[in-house]
Amino acid sequence: MDLRLSEREEAFRAEARAWLAAHVPKKPLPSSGSRDGFAAHVAWEKELFAAGWSVVAWPKAYGGREASIVEWLLFEEEYYLAGAPNRVTQNGIFLLAPALFEFGTDEQKERLLRPMAAADVLWAQGWSEPNAGSDLAAVASTATRTDGGWLLRGQKTWSTRAAFCHALHGLFRTDPSAPRHKGLTYFLVPLDAPGVRVSGFRRLDGDEDFAEVFFDDVFVPDRDVLGAVHQGWKVAMATTGSERGLTLRSPGRFLATADRLIDLYRRNRQAADPRLRDAVIQAWMDAQAYQLFTLQAVSRLAEGKALGAESSINKIAWSEMDLRLHETALEVLGPLAELTGDAPDAVDGGTWIKGFQFALAGPIYAGTNEIQRNVIAERLLGLPKE
Ligand SMILES: Cc1cc2nc3c(=O)[nH]c(=O)nc-3n(C[C@H](O)[C@H](O)[C@H](O)COP(=O)(O)OP(=O)(O)OC[C@H]3O[C@@H](n4cnc5c(N)ncnc54)[C@H](O)[C@@H]3O)c2cc1C
């Protein structure tokens, strides 16, 4: 493939770079996992949206600028290189939106997409339950038919940012007599609806945006069913392509981390042993390789092909690479690695240890890596089923 950028793409990159250089907060925002930090991130999202950089690849009608997928990748690269804040809109714009574009009615797209991109309505993903994680088809929360809509009962858990969000998208069982995958429906639920109880809890790294969400006969009107009734599995599987594949973890994020790692290594010459130097170089090469792999996938998408089960390869690649990048940084830092942001001698504001703690979760969320290996074995390599 031809890796050279067109004039239009170069111009797009330059425009994005200039805007980000002028607007990215000079001092990093407090963690989006705290209430104050979340509010600061929402304010940043609104600034991004007002300038047309929130959802660059979306149609203009919904606040986008109709950028191509290559331009979107360039924007992501510039975004992370500029050290811009993490996106608290991501469970909406990267996970729900692709499903809305594919399965949503015109009325739903009209009503939901713009407020999502503008950070007026923040979305959480409600798939996992105490007994349905890897085995997602075991979802036991139910939705039963009532006049004009549905009544939701049950519990979701591990819902990122749900403690601070306005709405949740997720799977509920609408036909308990059907085979497991066939009796589910995809619902869109405001978190302030009567009967919803959101119970936040703290994570290992101190963030408190995680939540369990309880539903006690919560009324959801028919207009908030996404896709056909009993076809929720199909909607969810379309979303997993985005979550494991391109949109949630674009290469820009890791290219920027690899650059920061090299900078960290340069600043810590005392750590200059050959094994560590090799690990830093390997981390940089891994990030470059992931970018090339992504460009290959993008070329295939541009030819009208789907990613499908191959997004599982992507998921393993980025999550394991992120861990290695952070583990190498901790080794470079030596004993200083353990200092968190509030310690006076913390290097880079303690971001490496916090990043490491989050990277530990990478092989778990978006479907564990063991499950991705099963998918690769069975669907890509044709090995016998487990
Ligand atoms: C940081 C973070 C954010 C998250 N955010 C969300 C969110 O926003 N919304 C949401 O709905 N969920 C979210 N999750 C939940 C996540 O999707 C689940 O944790 C994940 O799917 C695993 O499910 P589980 O925790 O129930 O583990 P289990 O499914 O119980 O798995 C336990 C272990 O057994 C292994 N295992 C299970 N089945 C198999 C098998 N068939 N073959 C081989 N190994 C197997 C798993 O790989 C894992 O190591 C998040 C999780 C984390 C860590």
Image (tube, rainbow, N blue to C red):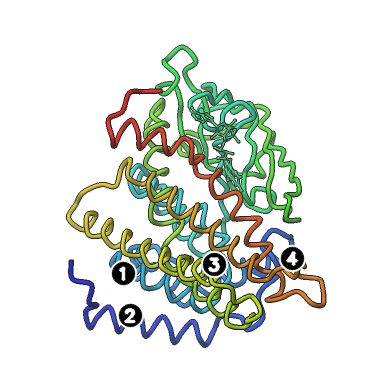
Q: Residues within 10 Å of mark 3 (few under 14, many from 20)?
A: few
In the rendered structure, which disc, 3 or 4, sits on the residue that comes first in sequence? 4
Classify 274 as above or below 183. Answer: below
Q: Give the secondary structure at mark 2.
A: helix
User: Can you identify the residue that label 4 sits on?
Assistant: 36
- Judged left or right of residue 141, residue 55 is left
Label annotation for residue 133: none
Instruction: Work out how far the residue at label 3 is from the one at label 4, CA to CA, in angstroms.
Output: 41 Å
Amino acid type for the residue under numbered disc 2? Phe
Spatial CA span between label 2 and label 4: 33 Å
Q: Quadrant of the C terminus?
A: top left
- Type of the residue with mark 3: Arg
x and y, in percent, of residue 151 in the image: 58, 26
Q: Please, what is the three-letter code of the amino acid marked with disc 1?
A: Ala
Looking at this view, name the residue that lies furthest to the front: 274
Query: Which residue corresponds to mark 1?
Result: 67
Q: Which residue is mark 3?
A: 275
Residue with the mark numbered 2 = 12
Q: Quadrant of ligand 1?
A: top right
Across and down, in percent, residue 240 comes to 42, 43
User: Disc 2 vs disc 4: Cβ atoms closer than 8 Å?
Assistant: no
Q: Is residue 303 above or below residue 371?
A: below
| Sequence order check, earlier mark of 2 and 4 | 2
Query: Quick one: label 2 or label 3, which is nearer the N terminus?
Result: 2
Residue 283 point in image, percent of width and height: 48, 66
User: Does label 1 or label 4 sit earlier along the sequence?
Assistant: 4
Of the two numbered discs 1 and 3 on the same chain, state the one appearing first in sequence. Answer: 1
Look at the image and tell me in which quarter the N terminus lies. bottom left
